[in-house]
Amino acid sequence: MRDVYRGLAMATAVAAVVAALVMVLPSEPDEVAAGPVTAPPAAPPSSGSARSSEPSSAQSSEPSPEPSAGPSQEPSQEPSSGPSDPPASAAPAQQPTPSPSGSLAPGYTAMEALHADPRVPKLSRGVKRIPLRSPGKRFVKDARTGLAVPRLSGPWKPHGAAPFTTKQVLPRTRGADMRGMFVTCPLPILAQKSPRDTALLAARWTLNHHPDGSRITWLASQPVKRGWMLVYRVTYGKHTSRAAVVIMDGGMSKPGLAFVTVPDSRRKQWRDIGRVASGVRVLG
């Protein structure tokens, strides 16, 4: 009986060992090779089978085509803005395009710049005409403007014309900043449809030949044959000058300009202003 019990004990021990091995070892050796041997993958595995996940892995390893490889790939890279949204390049076209005039700031006309200039007041209807004096018999011919202008008597004298085409000057007065001069040249500003407007712009331009801060006061305004004439006073500090411009079409590509200015240090020559204003003629 003792041998029987010993055999049963050994059999029971063997059975226990076999059962333990069955619980620890997998049923097939292939599952060990299929499992991870280091760290788990960064992304969780797909819920599909291993065979179905292999094609997607192969596709991700291939280099993607360049964006310009085909036109059908363009919309997939940037979302469409929709049919109601205008393209970005259309935005500037909706704004009005300024139309510059000459050397003016874009968007401003010459007359708008004139009206905005505080140095030049509005030419009202209250500005009167002046009687035109006899121009005399002596003239200076200017072939570039197509005009003839009075040759003024002493103390006026001819002078180097540049940058004008003709020039007559008064002697300098000691202590005076301004010098009297009478010049002609082709119109240095943009001509307007109205000779009156052109003369206004020319008078404004003549402020370049007066001291800084000069301001205009209108004295006379009237039409002349083939043009317009303006007479005005220029004030700068404690001093003044009398001046005049005559715009006249001399048959050239540009109208001609005659401009005279006389400072208050030469008041006796203010009488020559009217002679100049009335004496401009077309050549021929």
Image: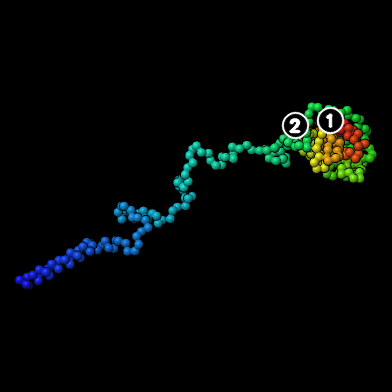
Q: Residue at x 64, y 38 (%)?
A: 97
Q: Which residue is mark 1?
A: 220
In the image, residue 127 above or below residue 1: above
For the N terminus, which image quadrant? bottom left
Viewer-proximal residue among 273 and 54: 273
Residue indicated by mark 2: 193
On the image, the x and y values in percent for residue 193 come to 75, 31
| Percent coordinates x, y for residue 197 in the rendering | 77, 32
Q: Front-most of 220 and 283?
A: 220
Question: Which amino acid type is marked by label 2?
Answer: Lys
Report whether 169 appears left or right of 101. right
Closest to the observer: 225 or 14? 14
Work out whether mark 2 precedes mark 1 in sequence or the reverse, and give the earlier one: 2
- As helix, strand or loop, the secondary structure at mark 2 comes to loop
Question: In the image, 109: left or right of 158?
Answer: left
Extreme residue in the right direction: 154
- In this rendering, would 3 be left or right of 274? left
2 or 1: mark nearer the eye: 1
Residue 116 quadrant: top right
- Label 1 amino acid? Ala
Residue drawn where x is 55% and y is 42% of the image:
88
Q: Is 57 drawn above or below residue 101 in the view shown?
A: below
